[in-house]
Amino acid sequence: MKRLLSATINSLHGIAYGIRSEAALREEIIVLVLAVPAGVFVAPNAAWYTAMVGVILLLIAVEFLNTAIEKLADHVTREQHHEIRRIKDFGSAAVFSTIALCGIVWLAAIAVRCRMI
């Protein structure tokens, strides 16, 4: 129980620090806050709603991982380094891919709701 409490506190610290320090995380949290009620009206059913909100939570998780990679890379060296730049670009590509997934899921839900597919 103590380990679970400690892990929860560490996670909450990470969330708070991320929101304070990273504009992208703040923007994605705003999207989540807007998506939770909007999804109720857009989602064709509960499974779609779960997928629609879940994919945004996935985006936030990937953004946290990307932020962790970038912070670690900056800690290793502030100098321009080709391989570190590539590592940061991989993290950015993961975020971009997840944003694309969010768009696909939300557009598919809208299409199903409007009986387009």
Image (cartoon, rainbow, N blue to C red):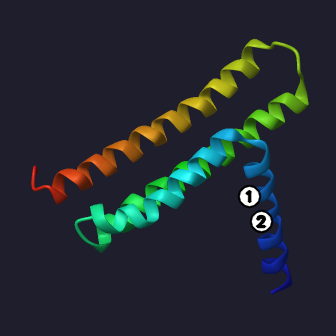
Residue 69's place in the image compared with 38, above or below, is above
Q: Indicate the position of residue 24 as horizontal and vertical percent values.
A: 64, 40
Say left or right for 109 vs 52. left
Give the SS element for disc 2. helix
Residue beneath disc 1: 15
Q: Residue at x 57, y 48 (%)?
A: 28
Q: Nearer the viewer, residue 17 or 11?
A: 17
The quarter of the picture where the N terminus appears is bottom right
User: Within the image, what quadrant is residue 95 found in?
Assistant: top right
Q: Nearer the viewer, residue 83 or 11?
A: 11
Q: Indicate the position of residue 104 as horizontal and vertical percent values.
A: 32, 44
Q: Nearer the viewer, residue 37 or 105?
A: 37
Check residue 12 in the rendering and tell me which mark sits there, or answer none. 2
Give the SS element for disc 1. helix
Residue 79's place in the image compared with 36, above or below, is above
Q: Residue at x 47, y 42 (%)?
A: 98
Say left or right for 64 vs 8. left
Q: Indicate the position of residue 60 as horizontal and vertical percent values.
A: 59, 51
Check residue 117 in the rendering and tell me which mark sits there, or answer none. none
Q: Residue at x 22, y 66 (%)?
A: 44
